[in-house]
Image (spheres, rainbow, N blue to C red):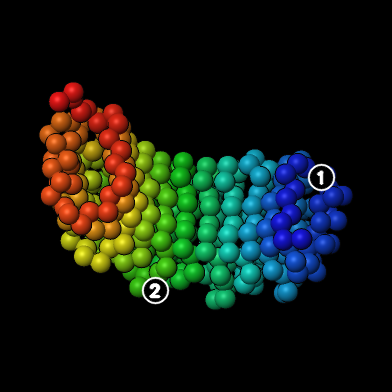
Amino acid sequence: CAHLGIESTIGESGVEALAGVMATNTTVHYLTLNLKDVSQNVAKKVLAAIGQNTCTELRDLRFAAGSLPEGFEGAFGPLLQMNSSLRSLTLDSNSVGDAVVVAIADAMLENQGTRLRDLNLNGTGIGAHAGDALARLLRKNCSLEALSSSSNKLGASAGAACFRALQKNAGTKLRKLVFAANGFGPAAGEAIAALLRRNRSLEWLQLENNTQLGDAAGAALAGALRENAETRLQFLSFANCGLGPKAGEGFAELLRSSRSLETLNLSVNPELGDTAGAALAQALQANAESRLRTLYLSSTGLGPA
């Protein structure tokens, strides 16, 4: 059985039985759990069983939205401190709080054999304390390839710390970073630009709905990418980030020379205006080596001309 999905609650007795199975199972690769209405003590038994199973082949562990019980932070340390099979962990739309993410980050840092490549924390209600923990993780971890933490409250300071940490990690393999709607401001924008000036691993970056990033940050980010001849960035979303004419000019200059970008989303930045729209079009015409396939410009103040 490669896939096992417990999409509806199976009650405490069912979860206890599942824990018994996962303690010795070597065939399940993908497990989706719904732990709604299950006590934290019983729910923790499943994670403890997986963590204690040195022969487990579990690669993908997902928790159904809104199904994780409160006070679950103590369960992830034992699971991740020793495990070397998990490749993906998804907690999306579960209000786990900062303590769970701190426990995950600390366990991954302790486990030199971790192979976790994909960590999904979208809509988990985490804030600055969790952001600082993610920064510590990004500073040293060399297994993660994708990190998603959108619609949270990391804030500008923790966000900037994450980008600075990633910049210092020469061995990072991170290819995809999703930090949409996290309350980032200009300070985070400066850190993003500094990272992109030298980074050679990122291929996908989503920053949409960080409305306070602003025009100067957008211009700095575009300029940093233009300076980085070795960038591999293919997907960039800067929608609804408070961009204006300076950013428009910067992205136009970027598109004039970029040979990596395939998708650029600048939508819902009404201050870009006609001048930026014209400059972007002219830049694309001038770049015979452009790989851009998709350019989003809805709600950017473009006129009929």
Q: Residues within 10 Å of mark 1 (few under 14, many from 20)?
A: some
Looking at the image, how many numbered discs can be counted on the residues?
Answer: 2
Task: Determine the image quadrant of residue 114.
Answer: bottom right
Which residue in the protein does label 1 denote?
10
Image spot of residue 54 (x, y percent): 72, 74
Please give the label number shown on residue 171: 2
**Can the viewer see residue 303?**
yes
Q: CA distance from mark 2 to mark 1?
A: 42 Å
Image spot of residue 151 (x, y percent): 46, 41
Q: Secondary structure at mark 1?
A: loop
In the image, what residue occupies the spot 83% across and 44% down?
Answer: 11
Left or right, residue 210 beside residue 290:
right
**Can the viewer see residue 127?**
no
Image spot of residue 107 (x, y percent): 58, 66
Foreground of the two, 85 or 36: 85
Left or right, residue 292 beside residue 74:
left
Q: Secondary structure at mark 2?
A: loop
Image spot of residue 72 (x, y percent): 67, 52
Left or right, residue 301 beside residue 94:
left
The N terminus - image quarter: bottom right
Residue type of the residue flagged with mark 1: Ile
Outermost residue, top side? 304
